[in-house]
């Protein structure tokens, strides 16, 4: 039986794909074929149910082509409790119902994990100063083996590349080791699967699936904040995987310490690994992304014509996030393709009127000064006053830096709003913060937090 099943598995991996094969079919063991029934051992009922619904026809077909007379499948499932109260019990097995043909199956159980987007790879991730550390850490994790930090925690605002990097890690990890089981899903999906397992009394199957992976990746973990039961299960799953030396990758829109409603013990566990911020994009990074996307499109449509200064214009005007930037470029490509027109500055302004209006910077220097003064607990009057004490001067320089980054005001204008200071003083303050933020992680995180709050 092992030889027959081994040959069938080689063909099944090709037909259903490595990811589906590794998750669902590889854990099965063919025990025998009798009276047209192929009998399998399955580690969990969840796996057997899923295989019955989605891959029964594939398995029956391959076994039949190998000379076995198979009409349906049967699964013996061993459910094994993990806690000490029943660790001495013997495993129980029970037959599963005969599988219905896949074409007639009721698809009422969603995928355990979310599908990976084939577009999100390291090859098309544009690296710049705001994301180079996150990219390097993601690359290291994707190589497998001991990395020195677990989990890898990626955080940042919407559209800065967190999900792209997570998908890229999964793709590279599985390409390196096709047999590896990588489970990627959102925190909401984790919560939904947990609630579903409680409702259907399949909690041991849930535990088995989530704790039997090589890498667990959870996106937008802030969504489990305030969900006590889900946090309890997440905590135990996290600990079980770390104890086994399995890698965990987490993303969120803020640091663990900033997620309100998240249990302190989970914040502590998440903070034990490497926490990396994906900073808001710079003009240079946005321009690089636009150039990369344009080259890809040109390979598909050789007659694409785009005028001088268009990409530079988009990079300077659309600053909220990369998704909006890419969406604007895609709209221009579609416009040019359908109307057979060159993309000029005038065409871009006309075609993207709504996006440009939405992305016009509305943050004022007053807003920045108030937010920085509040964050550092200093008086607003000190922000524009003559005090030079470090506890005042440093926040003032941060406010200058953010004013330069987040408004269209010139240096002399910014100087006037900071108590009539000379533009060279503003320039010095901006450069000082740029230098310090490269070396001071705490300062860098403060600036990123302030920026997210101002742009929210």
Image: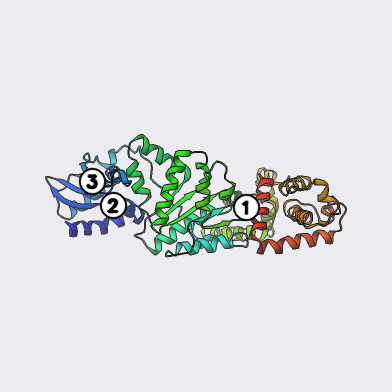
Residue placed at 33% from the left, 43% from the top? Answer: 204
Q: Nearer the viewer, mark 1 or mark 3?
A: 3
Tag nearer the camera, 3 or 2: 3
Instruction: Give the alpha-carbon distance from disc 1 to disc 2, as whole Å.
Output: 51 Å
Q: Secondary structure at mark 1?
A: loop
The N terminus: image quadrant: bottom left
> Which of disc 2 and disc 1 is earlier in sequence?
2
* Residue 25 - label: 2
Quadrant housing residue 131: bottom right
**Place of residue 286 in the rendered image (x, y in percent of width and height, measured from the top left):** 63, 57
Mark 3, Cα crowd under 10 Å, few <14 / some 14-19 / many 20+, is few
User: x, y percentage for residue 12?
Assistant: 27, 55
Residue 158 picture location, percent across and down: 58, 48
Count neighbours of disc 2 (C-alpha within 10 A) and say few if under 14, some if 14 to 19, many if 20 or more.
many
Q: Quadrant of the C terminus?
A: top right
Does the rendering let one see residue 338?
no
> Residue 346, relative to residue 96: is it above or below?
below
**Which residue is denoted by mark 1 in the rendering?**
341
Answer whether residue 321 is visible to the viewer in this image.
Answer: yes
Work out how far the residue at label 3 is from the one at label 2, CA to CA, in angstroms: 21 Å
Label 1 or label 2, whichever lies nearer to me, is 2
- Between the residue at mark 1 and the residue at mark 3, the CA separation in whole angstroms equals 69 Å
Residue at 34 percent across and 39 percent down: it is 107
Q: Position of residue 416 (x, y in %)?
A: 86, 52
- Report which residue position mark 3 lands on: 91
| Labels 3 and 2: the sequence-earlier one | 2
Question: Which residue is outermost to the right?
Answer: 420
Q: Closer to the N terminus: mark 1 or mark 3? A: 3
Q: Give the SS element for disc 3.
A: loop
């Amino acid at each position: 039986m092992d030889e027959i099943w081994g040959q069938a598995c080689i063909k099944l991996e090709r037909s259903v794909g490595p990811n589906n094969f590794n998750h669902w079919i590889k854990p099965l063991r063919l025990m025998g074929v009798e009276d047209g029934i192929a009998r399998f051992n399955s580690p969990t009922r969840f796996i057997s149910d899923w295989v019955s619904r989605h891959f029964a026809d594939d398995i029956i077909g391959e076994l039949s082509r190998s000379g076995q007379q198979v009409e349906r499948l049967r699964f013996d499932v061993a459910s094994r409790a993990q806690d000490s109260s029943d660790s001495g019990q013997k495993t129980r097995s029970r037959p599963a119902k005969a599988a219905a043909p896949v074409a007639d199956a009721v698809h009422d159980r969603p995928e355990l994990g979310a599908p990976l987007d084939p577009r999100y790879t390291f090859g098309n991730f544009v690296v710049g100063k705001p994301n180079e550390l996150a990219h390097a850490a993601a690359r290291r994790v994707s190589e497998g083996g001991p990395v020195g930090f677990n989990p890898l925690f990626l955080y940042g605002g919407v559209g800065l590349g967190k999900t792209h990097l997570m998908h890229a890690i999964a793709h590279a990890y599985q390409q390196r080791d096709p047999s590896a089981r990588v489970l990627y899903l959102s925190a909401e999906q984790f919560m939904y699967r947990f609630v579903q397992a409680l409702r259907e009394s399949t909690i041991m199957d849930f535990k088995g699936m989530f704790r039997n992976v090589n890498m667990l990746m959870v996106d937008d973990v802030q969504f489990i904040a305030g969900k006590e039961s889900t946090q309890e299960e997440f905590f135990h799953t996290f600990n079980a995987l770390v104890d086994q030396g399995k890698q965990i990758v987490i993303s969120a829109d803020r640091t663990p310490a900033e997620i309100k409603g998240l249990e302190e013990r989970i914040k502590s566990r998440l903070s034990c690994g490497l926490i990396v911020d994906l900073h808001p994009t710079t003009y240079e990074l946005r321009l690089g992304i636009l150039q990369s996307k344009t080259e890809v499109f040109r390979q598909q449509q050789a007659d694409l014509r785009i005028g001088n200064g268009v990409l530079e214009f988009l990079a300077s005007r659309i600053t909220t996030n990369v998704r909006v930037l890419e969406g604007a470029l895609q709209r221009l490509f579609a416009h040019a393709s359908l109307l057979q027109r060159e993309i000029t500055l005038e065409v871009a302004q006309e075609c993207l009127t709504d996006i440009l209006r939405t992305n016009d910077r509305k943050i004022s220097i007053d807003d920045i000064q108030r937010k920085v003064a509040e964050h550092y607990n200093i008086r607003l009057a000190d922000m524009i006053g003559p005090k030079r004490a470090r506890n005042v001067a440093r926040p003032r320089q941060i406010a200058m830096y953010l004013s330069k980054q987040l408004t269209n005001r010139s240096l002399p204008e910014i100087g006037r709003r900071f108590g009539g200071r000379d533009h060279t003083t503003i320039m010095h303050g901006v450069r000082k913060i740029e230098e310090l933020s490269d070396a001071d992680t705490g300062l860098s995180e403060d600036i990123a937090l302030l920026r997210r709050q101002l742009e929210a």
